[in-house]
Image (cartoon, rainbow, N blue to C red):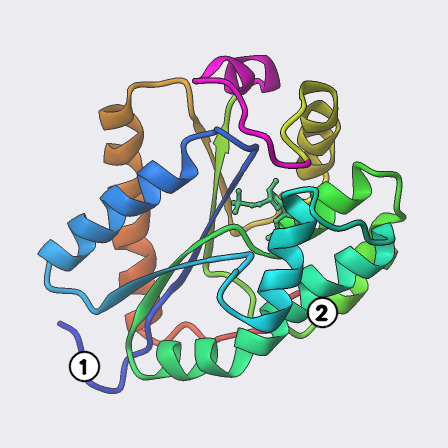
Amino acid sequence: GQHSSSRGSLIVFEGLDRSGKTSQCGKLLSYLKGEGLSVEAWRFPDRSTGVGQMISSYLANQSNLDDRAIHLLFSANRWEKRALMENKLQSGITLIVDRYSYSGVAFSAAKGLDIEWCKAPEAGLIAPDLVIYLDVLPEKAAERGGYGTERYEQLEFQKRVAEHYKTLHDDSWEVIDGCLSMEAVQQQLRELATNCVKTCQRGKPLVSLWS
Ligand code: TMP
């Protein structure tokens, strides 16, 4: 059973724009809540902070920033939430997070920035217990209701992002075929998340990312 001292899990969703992450996160959140779990949905960028507003304006093409400067802002946006994230996890709350450091690296590397340079400012953030990568071909993602008007929503760019994501897979990653039906994907996610939550409740330690 769940002990008051047991920690929550950090479950991260990654994937291209229009890969279905946001819908699947919402469904997983409702399911886990229904199972009686303490769970919250987070997302990065968190556009509610001052840094987040700078990012949001950049993404909407309302401002221009140097590639390294925007990279560091995305990272700072995670750092400003790190302490709260740790407190929530330690108090037993599971976090389902729509994008994290892997987006930070894959999107910036797709612009031609060095991967190690991109990873460096992420080192020391909390490592996810589970990363769910929703795998869809860039061409398929582009067809799904079309892209919006945000800066990175372009097929050629998304293809490069997909290539960089592939270099970031580690033991915490589960690649799910995002072209299966909504229900089939969700079924797999529920099983993965449930197992992850149990492992963390049994005392799996929190560790740092890339350090
Ligand atoms: P969103 O559509 O999930 O809100 O993400 C906005 C865009 O920002 C999306 O194209 C991915 C990109 N992004 C980065 O380039 N670096 C990051 O660190 C994050 C979290 C997102």
- What residue span does the magenta drawing correspond to? 137-151
Tell me if 2 is positioned left or right of 75 in this view: left
Residue 138 in the magenta stretch? The answer is: yes
Q: Residue at x 31, y 51 (%)?
A: 193
In the image, is the residue at mark 2 within 8 Å of ligand 1 by its beta carbon?
no
Secondary structure of the residue carrying tag 1 is: loop
Residue 19 x %, y %: 47, 29
Q: Does 190 sit left or right of 67 as displayed?
A: left
User: Residue 123 bears which disc, if any?
Assistant: 2
Task: Answer above or below: position of 145 versus 107.
Answer: above
Residue at 85% over, 50% down: 67
Residue positioned 45% across, 75% down in the render: 85
Q: Residues within 10 Å of mark 1 (few under 14, many from 20)?
A: few
Q: Relative to 10, does residue 115 appear above or below in the rendering?
A: above
Of 191 and 61, which appears nearest the observer? 61
Q: Which residue is mark 1?
A: 3
Amino acid carrying label 2: it is: Ala
Tell which of 113 and 191 is nearer to you. Answer: 113
